[in-house]
Amino acid sequence: MRSTEEFRPPVTSIGAIGWIRQNLFSNFFNSLLTLLILYFLCRTLPSFINWAVIDAVWWSDGRTCNQINGACWSVITKNLRFILFGFYPYEQQWRPVLSICLLAAFIVYSSFRRAWNKHLPIAWLVGLVLIGLIMRGGVFGLPSVETEKWSGISLTLLLSIFGLSAAYPFGVILALGRRSRLPAIKTLCVLYIELIRGVPLISMLFMASVMFPLFLPEGITINKILRAQAAIVMFTAAYIAEVVRGGLQAIPRGQYEAAESLGLNYYQKMRLIILPQALRTVIPPTVSILISAFKDTSLVVIIGLFDLLRTTQVTLSNPEWTGFSTEAYLFAAFIYFMGCFVMSNFSRRLATKQYT
Amino acid sequence: MSLTRTATVDASDHERVPLWRDPAKRAIAFQAVTLGLVFMLSYWIFSNAQSNLRKQSIATGFGFLSKEAGFEIGESLIPYSAAETYFRALSAGFLNTLKVSIAGVILTIILGVFVGISRLSKNWLLARIAAGYIEVLQNIPVLLQLFFWYGLFYTSLHGPRKSFNPVPGVFFNNRGFYFPFPEYHSAYPAMAVALFAACFAGCLLHKWSRTRQDKTGQSFPVMPVALGGVVGLPLIVWLAYGMPIRLDTPHLAGFNYEGGFSFSPEFVALLLGLVLYTSAFVAEIVRAGIQSVSRGQTEAAMSIGLKPGEVLSLVILPQAMRLIIPPMTNQMLNLTKNSSLAVAIGFPDFVAVVNTSINQTGQAIEGVSLIMIVYLTISLVTSSLMNRYNKRTAIIER
């Protein structure tokens, strides 16, 4: 009998060579494709690396930047604090940093499935109020900072996270209303949801910036950030309602009937039996809504609020730094990308896991 | 529990159910209260708006539509000047929105399907690049992408006199992208008619071959014949007219290029941003749709002797389409809605024109309502068409 040693597969079908053969050169067409892509990469990558790393400057002023061929990353390093925190008082900028760290801690904590119980919403509520207090000041001996000064990434996070948190209960009510047996309630909710989902967010923001002031009685004014926040809440709620409706529909009829047969009334049935199950199943799509909300807050640029994108633009409007928009926008894109990427990976992990 | 009920309710009890315990009456009361609150809120808003408008002496109603607009529009598909009415300005804006949406939808579908299929390619390199494309472009706000492209054009392209000239006749500068365009010749309308006729004939051919296959089982190569007709018929007309090939090439006249066919940098930036962003989502939808068709279907199709192309077109795609179409419709509507971001980079779409009108007349309520009505109409029309298509392709179960 021959030993198994002699029956080992040929070297060309295992190991690195085998992998390359199988994944890059499996047939004529694939080989051609691989060669084409490699050629294209060879043509573009070196010049990109030259631009982004080798010829780039990191800590110079604007005038030096104009004389070189590479990327001018100084536009970011020199204006980093302004891009990130905007007009928030310079000495107080540790407060947005602390708030962002707190927020990150909350998000990480919420990603553990053990934490998904009824205390979590309360913890979030307390956390958001705490973050709000840290940012706003006026307590614990912190000097108060007007909301008009909140800008940069703090405004982006404020609008998206606070917006989603405020929109969530509203969205749940709308979803319940849409599945209600009462015709008037159902019609109202359907009208609201479909109307909002049919129009672009920008029209809601225009509404907030030019129409809301007309709707309020004379003498009462609400600042622009709050108005934009209201528009984002109204907009997001409609999308949350549709997601929650999906969750409600996924609950088997037996659960409703069992709850009714126990003698629970509508509110008890929803609060104790249906919603806890429905809301759990919709956590992954809710994270997608948070991602969209995070990206969509950049639209407030159009009505003149100073979010991350706008502070980047303000930096670029400084004559010293005009013309380096590519570098600055790449940096902003990187920040948005990191935020969305982390969240979407999280939701994907949840979606693949079995949970109920 | 506070609301325990007695287990036995006899007939006499039933008659004496208190008013607030009767579900039917309670429902009516609850709805009446809700409607009342909504009406009160609306009335409050309405009266506030009226008094505010009166105080600021802003006109109400849509009368402004017939007044002179007094502002220029950068580009328009219909003849427009500042002396025309607001209505005409808004129409020009609306047509621009349609132009960018339709071009965007077509390009997005092509690019999205291509990237989605590449994502599933057996070629590791191609699949990784497609995955990176999807991951990066999905996670960057579309507005930022628009600014990025627009900024890139403005920093890398120079004035008309220093245009970038990649191939003869094509000029890129910061005023626009200029391409040569065939000069008008009487052959072209005839060619368009020929193209239309060929498409119509192709449809008839498809129908005929379908009925024949149902009856006899014989298949007919519809696709090659139809494609041949669509390309060949206009070509024959072109040859018959003596092959007009005169091109209208853009040339420098004064401070800018004239002639040919041009796109503004705003339009290109908007289109590029929208197409790249949305195609990443479309690619994911296409990938999920194809992956949803079980492997057994492919194997079954191959075992009855279909060729790889036939497996894809006759077995996989018709099943994948059912899953692809509804989210795809959503993405197309998203693209249309996102085209309103044009206002941020100065492309005169509907929202941008309305915005200018609001700034001039102060009639914010009418302006914002117009935007909402227009987009709602587009959404409703598209989704009703798509629902009809969906019903036709839905699985017919016994």
Image: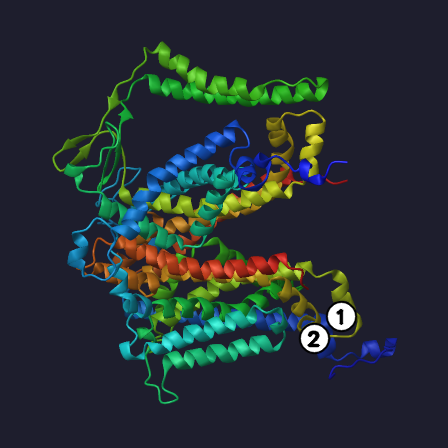
Q: Which quadrant of the view contains residue A23?
A: top right
Q: Which quadrant of the view contains residue B245?
A: top left
Q: Which residue is mark 1?
A: A259
Kindly tell me whether residue B387 is visible in this rendering. Answer: no
Position of A215 relative to A40 (above/below): below
Near-viewer residue (B125 or A315): B125
Mark 1–mark 2 CB contact (< 8 Å): yes
Q: Residues within 10 Å of mark 1 (few under 14, many from 20)?
A: some
Near-viewer residue (B144 or A17): A17
At label 2, which amino acid type do we have?
Answer: Gln
Residue pictured at 70% horizontal, 22% vertical: B214
Q: Position of residue A62 (x, y in %)?
A: 18, 59
Q: CA distance from mark 1 to mark 2?
A: 9 Å
Q: Which residue is mark 2?
A: A268
| The furthest residue to the left | B254
Tell me which numbered mark, 1 or 2, is placed earlier along the sequence.
1
